[in-house]
Structures are given as C-alpha cells and as structure tokens.
Image: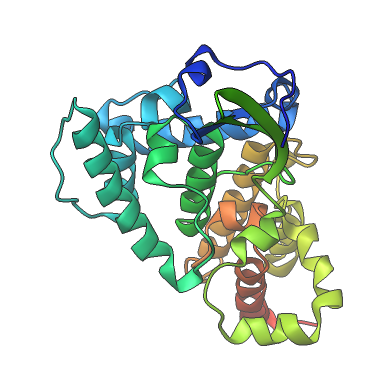
Amino acid sequence: MCPAPVEVHPEDSLLEENEERTVIDPTSRDDPRFKELVKVLIDWINDVLVEERIIVKQLEEDLYDGQVLQKLLEKLADCKLNVAEVTQSEIGQKQKLQTVLEAVQELLRPHSRPLQWTVDSIHGKNLVAILHLLVALAMHFRAPIHLPEHVSVQVVVVRKREGLLHSSHVTEELTTTTEMMMGRFERDAFDTLFDHAPDKLSVVKKFADGVYLVLLMGLLEDYFVPLHNFYLTPDSFDQKVHNVSFAFELMLDGGLKKPKARPEDVVNLDLKSTLRVLYNLFTKYKHLE
C-alpha cells in the first residue's frame, strides 16, 4: 500500500497508528444495484419489526449499537436474548453486539463460512460488514424478498502508518446468484437429482413467475382461469408472488395439500421448492392423459 489521494471521512484523520477504516468508493454507492440492495434490506427489516414500531432509515446509523439487530434476530429466530434493553455506553453497546453476533454465529454454524463482520466493524458503522451480516440473515431465514444478484462494491481501505494515511482498493462481493446463496441449506433427497441432472433443471425456472403454474392448474382441473385474476406478463417481484400465491390457492381448491414452499421461494428460483410443488401436482394428476 502507498499513500494515495482519496476522499477520506474526517474521522479517519483521527485513526490511531496502524488502525484502519474502510470506505465504500462513491462510484459503488451510486450503483443502482447497490442502492437496490440497501433499499430491499431496509424495507425487509422495517417489515419484520413493524410491530415493534421500529423504523430503520440508514443502516450504518441505526444498526451499529446492536439494538435493532437484537430485535431483528429475536423476531426472526423467535427467541429472547439475555441483554440489556437500552445501552448508551460504548462498552455496553459492544457487549450487546457480542451477544447478538454470537447468537448469529451459532445459527449459521451448520453452513459455516468465514464471517465477514466483527463487533468492531459493525459498531464502527462499516456498511459493508453490516450488509454481509444482513444478507446472511436474509438467506438463512429465507426472507420473502428478492436480493439483486452480483452486487459488488469497491472498498477503499484506509490505514494510518507512521503518521500518514495509506489506502488500497478491494472488491467486496455482497451477493452472488440467488441459487448459490440459497444453496447454503442442508441437503436432502432432491439434491441427488440436482447432482445427476443439473442441465435438465433449467426448465424449472420457467415456473418462477407463476404464469405457467396458474395456466397448468386450469388445464389439469379443466377450467378457464380469468385473465384478470393474475398477471399474464408480470414485471415485478410482487406481481410474480401474486401469481404463485394464486396458483397455490387453485391447488388448495383442487384438493391438494398446502404447499410447504412459500411463493417467494418459487419466485426466488429456489429449485427444490419449485420441484416439490411440481412433484405434488404430478402425484395427484399422473393418471390424466
């Protein structure tokens, strides 16, 4: 690393010797996919915590002290953490964060990956670390949201050495593909099918917008589905979820059990969820010609 001209936050000039801080490159902050990722995660948190009357507006400022993360984890995992409700001191905030992040690590342990956040990075308002944490939670709890794929940011790492600020640039990958991110879950019998015929499963993606599922139910049950009941050419996540939800209602009306999969899982291209839905249809209607 060598000294380089870079926009540095005023607080960075107060760094201790050999201390470092990360700053997201302004160009990356302006990237539409990065902005979408932040917005989707903020909306998700606010939706989960609506009963707590907590409204998050800015991730760095609202999550760094552990208060919101505590409430979010308790709601998602249906648990109660043994921490003080309100802590104003830095020591108290870091103690709360330590408890919350240990609980997160315990949840993610079966799918162990190197953790990309620490107590200091979260408390230090490191947005990249906060985003890594939230993406991991969203994937683990199969949040009913659609995260934009292939979101990366350029990060400027600023370090103080011999009284001078030095900087280097690093690329941080925040999201990959939906299938890869959802693939952190435990394997079951359906994975054998994926292992032996991955090239034949791309057809499953055709059901992700719900249109084929709706039309298929009409064909199987021998009735016409009015076009005003669903979106024939859905162009948003919500419209696709509406279609799949409507198809699930038609399945219930046809005597099938309620699908274990959620509509959001199908829309998010979760292949196992989609295959389970199709397998249930096959089991009931396999006698039809």
- Quarter of the image with the N terminus is top right
Looking at the image, how many numbered discs can be counted on the residues? 0
Position of 244 relative to 164 (above/below):
below
Q: In this rendered view, identify the residue nearer to me: 149 or 252.
A: 149
Position of 181 relative to 209 (above/below):
below
Q: Quadrant of residue 204?
A: bottom right
Position of 67 relative to 163 (above/below):
below
Extreme residue in the right direction: 199
**Does the rendering let one see residue 269?**
no
Extreme residue in the top direction: 10
Q: In this rendered view, identify the residue nearer to me: 195 or 2.
A: 2
Q: Quadrant of residue 124?
A: top left
- Give the x, y percent position of residue 135: 54, 47
Q: Is residue 107 left or right of residue 52?
A: right
**Does the rendering let one see residue 247?**
yes
Q: In this rendered view, identify the residue nearer to me: 88 or 167.
A: 167
Point 59% across, 57% down: residue = 265
- Give the x, y percent position of residue 254: 56, 67
Q: Is residue 182 left or right of residue 197?
A: left
- Give the x, y percent position of residue 162: 56, 29
Q: In this rendered view, identify the residue nearer to me: 274 or 64.
A: 64
- Give the x, y percent position of residue 164: 60, 23
Q: Is residue 163 left or right of residue 204?
A: left
- Quarter of the image with the C terminus is bottom right
Q: Is residue 190 left or right of residue 14?
A: right
Point 74% across, 53% down: residue = 224
